[in-house]
Image: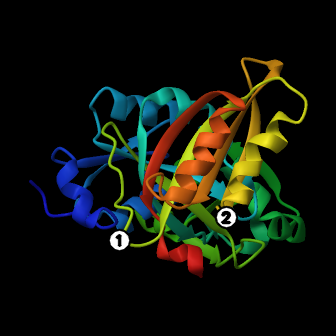
Amino acid sequence: MPAPLPGLDQRASALPPVRSIAYQGEPGANSDLVCRRAYPELERVPCASFEDVFAAVENGAADLAMIPIDNSLAGRVADIHHFLPTSGLHIIGEHFLRIQFTLMGVPGSRLEDVTTVHSHLHALGQCRNVIRELGLRPVISGDTAGAAREVAELGDPTQASISPPLAAEIYGLEILRDEVEDADHNTTRFVVLSREPVTAPADQGPVVTSFVFSVRNLPAALYKAMGGFATNGVNMTKLESYMVDGHFTATQFLAEVDGHPDQPNVARALEELQFFTTELKILGVYPASPARQL
């Protein structure tokens, strides 16, 4: 079996041999970068869409998936909350990546000649200031690294991309301006998914429990459902709602709490939650990243 994976440490023995990790985007994207940093020994499997990433792990084409779930500027990543509950995959870890974007163009291009900028929708939204300052026309690409590839293929000095610095190296572009993101706290949280559930120990450091639930269609059902976490002193760090199948009365919630289901206070809170829900599904119980404390 391969050496224990960073971020999985003593729990790696609970997984079958792990050789590959899938991500959405092209080589040089931020998802590629976090895979390189967190699991440098694994083969990286780029996928065109999030749906393809989930499918790659489900059908065995990859052993793990690295999925962005939140960004400190843009909020939650669209569609992920729809895929997670029905995928059959399990969250086994989390990683945080400080996002750095650069404006890059073909060799020999000049900043004053650039009129159009390509990038992913979220990246364009996170770099509004430089786009406005330079009066650039934004063009949406599938991902940030794909935008760099597009600009390299165009070979036009008026076209640039907003991409991670790694993409300039991969696609032979020149960096025209560094650190063009609007805020220096721009950070994305990624979760690691596996076909096999791997539950973190309850007594070896901080743990996060992620779960989804649907409340009964009753007055104050959500208020009552949350009461158990308050009375048992459980810190809830995430609560997001979204509609299921387009029904306004079928609301599902994605939640995360500090703690382990085996700890008495968390167990009591989850037990109380079930009185007011029609569905409760644990997505993962995994070590909290040290970056949460930064």
Please say whether residue 249 is visible from this viewpoint.
yes
Task: Check disc 1 and report the residue beneath it.
Answer: 204
Q: Which residue is mark 2?
A: 233
256 or 91: nearer the viewer? 256
- Expressed as whole percent of the image width and height from the top left, the position of residue 127 reads 77, 65
The first of marks 1 and 2 along the sequence is: 1
Q: How many labels sit on residues?
A: 2
Q: Is residue 84 left or right of residue 134?
A: left
Looking at the image, residue 268 lies above or below residue 50: below
* Helix, strand or loop for disc 1: loop
Which residue is at a point 28% across and 33% down the rendered structure image? 61
| Residue at image location 35% in from the left, 51% down from the top | 199
Nearest the eye: 202 or 169: 202
Give the residue type at disc 1: Gln
Q: Is residue 170 above or below residue 151?
A: below
Which quadrant is the C terminus positioned in?
Answer: bottom right
Other-residue count near label 1 (Cα within 10 Å), few / some / many at <14 / 14–19 / ≥20: few
In the displayed structure image, the side of residue 205 where residue 14 appears, left or right:
left
Position of 239 relative to 212 (above/below): below
Q: x and y percent of residue 60 in the render?
A: 27, 31
Secondary element at image label 2: loop
Query: Picture coordinates of residue 168 (x, y %)?
Result: 50, 66
Mark 2 burial class by Cα count in 10 Å: few <14, some 14-19, many 20+: few
Farthest residue in the left direction? 1
Q: Residue at x 43, y 29 (%)?
A: 88
- Residue at (61, 37) in percent of width and height: 212
